[in-house]
Amino acid sequence: MTTTDNALAQRSWIKDLFLVGVWLALPYLVVGIFWADAHREHLSKLHGLDATASYVGEVIAWPVLIFADVNLE
């Protein structure tokens, strides 16, 4: 194998790893968005950056929020 072949193989491996990450992240984010939309009662009390941070926090932390039964406010 030449250096060019090694570089192309490395680039292909990184691209494949990125695609796997995207395919794993998409369902996680979709479920997180559904979770945050279903639990948005507290967002009416928040405004601006606080509401945005709370919404993003619920999208990211939905597995913990399911089992811990807590709300981000």
Image (cartoon, rainbow, N blue to C red):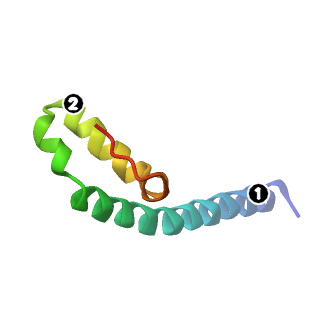
Picture disc at residue 14: none
Which residue lies under the disc numbered 1?
4
> Does residue 51 appear to the left or right of 17 in the view shown?
left
Describe the element under mark 2 as helix, strand or loop: helix
Which residue lies under the disc numbered 2?
49
* Quarter occupied by the N terminus: bottom right
Type of amino acid under label 2: Leu
> Does residue 5 appear to the left or right of 22 in the view shown?
right
Describe the element under mark 1 as helix, strand or loop: helix
Residue nearest the observer in this picture, 38 or 28? 38
Residue nearest the observer in this picture, 21 or 16? 21
Kindly report the distance in space between the C-alpha atoms of the residues bearing marks 1 and 2.
48 Å
> Does residue 66 appear to the left or right of 45 in the view shown?
right
**Residue at x 44% of width, y 49% of height:** 61
Q: Percent position (x, y) of residue 19?
A: 55, 66
> Does residue 63 appear to the left or right of 16 in the view shown?
left
Occupied quadrant, residue 28: bottom left
**Residue at x 63% of width, y 66% of height:** 16
Occupied quadrant, residue 13: bottom right
Q: Label 1 neighbourhood size at 10 Å, few (<14), some (14-19), many (20+)?
A: few
Q: Percent position (x, y) of residue 73?
A: 28, 37
Residue nearest the observer in this picture, 17 or 53? 53
Q: Nearer the viewer, mark 1 or mark 2?
A: 2
Q: Residue furthest right?
A: 1
Residue nearest the observer in this picture, 38 or 2? 38
**Residue at x 49% of width, y 52% of height:** 64
